[in-house]
Image (spheres, rainbow, N blue to C red):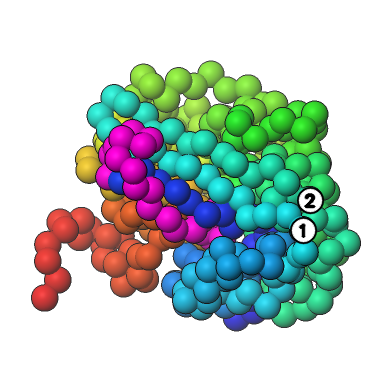
Amino acid sequence: MKQIVTFGEIMLRLKSPHHERFFQSPALEATFGGGEANVAVSLAILGNSSSFVTALPNNAIADGALAELRRHNVDVSSIVRTRGGRIGIYFLETGANQRPSNVVYDREHSAIATASANLFDWRSIFSHADWFHVTGITCAISEAAAQSTHEAMEIAKVMGLTTSIDLNYRKKLWNYGKTAPEVMRPLTALADVVVANEEDIQKCLGIEADIDVTKGDLSDGVYEQLARKVKSDFPNVGRIAITLRENLSADRNLWRAVMLGKEGFHVSQRYAMDDIVDRVGGGDSFSAGLIHALRTMDEATALRFAVAASCLKHSIGGDFNLTTLDEIEALMAGDGSGRVQR
């Protein structure tokens, strides 16, 4: 199969140990992550040819990020190294019980946030690709990054690639003067596949939904209605997948998804996740699972695969979903016992 290309920002992730508050102890765990890089890694682990595109400064921290991507067989040959800028950072404090997790961003003036759209030779990058994936996170970090994302999506469409977008609303990032709908609605019009939750749809697309995830009673019919509203506003979108996370506490979630596609409306199984290790990257693992599966499976099976993949991600620390194809297929077949494999 041809290559899957993702575009965005990879960051240094600094996390307080275990479930500690920031600086409760002097340690911070250093790894790397970021929405589109997470998708690229997951796709590579599932056996796809995946490429991640970004801009990174020419320093040792960025070298570490590249090494981590290479370790998971992600193609980094189209990453541009810049003289100026910096690598973005995010700090994570993992919640527990009724205390939510907390993310603090330090991403202003990063290399990708300041990179001009003409820095990337998209026609060359897409020459061996058939799928292009982006998220709303990159569009939120700066106007320049949003312009680069939009230009890349336009060229991908002209070249006949399948395009997907995870709306991924991040209220802490939309600070450069434009609202999320101003940027995200034109971008969504270029997508073949849209991934979102109910808040993403409301905040990024301005489409209202009468949904309260805290009540724990999420009707399939309400979500079908919401997906059809998106389809009505964006008729060129072929598939709309909506993830449904019911937050019982920071450690206990119910997880499933629905999708309005070319083959009808589909509802996945629901997983009870009672001992979450790390939920960051859960949505990215869903996107990767869906992209992987839609290339070879019918829509209903693809949705089940994506939900199973993202469920397993919640058992893994760090941004990346290190779950294998065999593990996902075992969970889809009903083996969620967690028994030791000998």
For the residue carrying disc 2, how many other residues have a C-alpha within 10 Å: few (<14), some (14-19), or many (20+)? some
| Residue that mark 1 sits on | 84
Residue 135 image offset from top left, x and y in percent: 64, 49
The residue positioned 71% from the left and 73% from the top of the image is 78
Q: CA distance from mark 2 to mark 1?
A: 9 Å
Inspect the magenta stretch and tell me whether residue 83 lies in it: no
Query: In the rendering, which numbered label is found on residue 134?
Result: none
Quadrant showing the N terminus: bottom right
Amino acid type at circle 1 is: Gly
Find disc 2 in the rendering and name its residue. Answer: 114
Q: Residues within 10 Å of mark 1 (few under 14, many from 20)?
A: few
The residue most toward the right is: 118
Question: Of helix, strand and loop, which one carries label 1?
Answer: loop
Residue 283 picture location, percent across and down: 48, 48
Q: Is residue 28 left or right of residue 162?
A: left
Spot occupied by residue 8 in the image (x, y as percentages of width and height): 66, 56
Percent position of residue 66, x then y: 57, 70
Give the magenta-colored segment's residue range.
Answer: 18-40
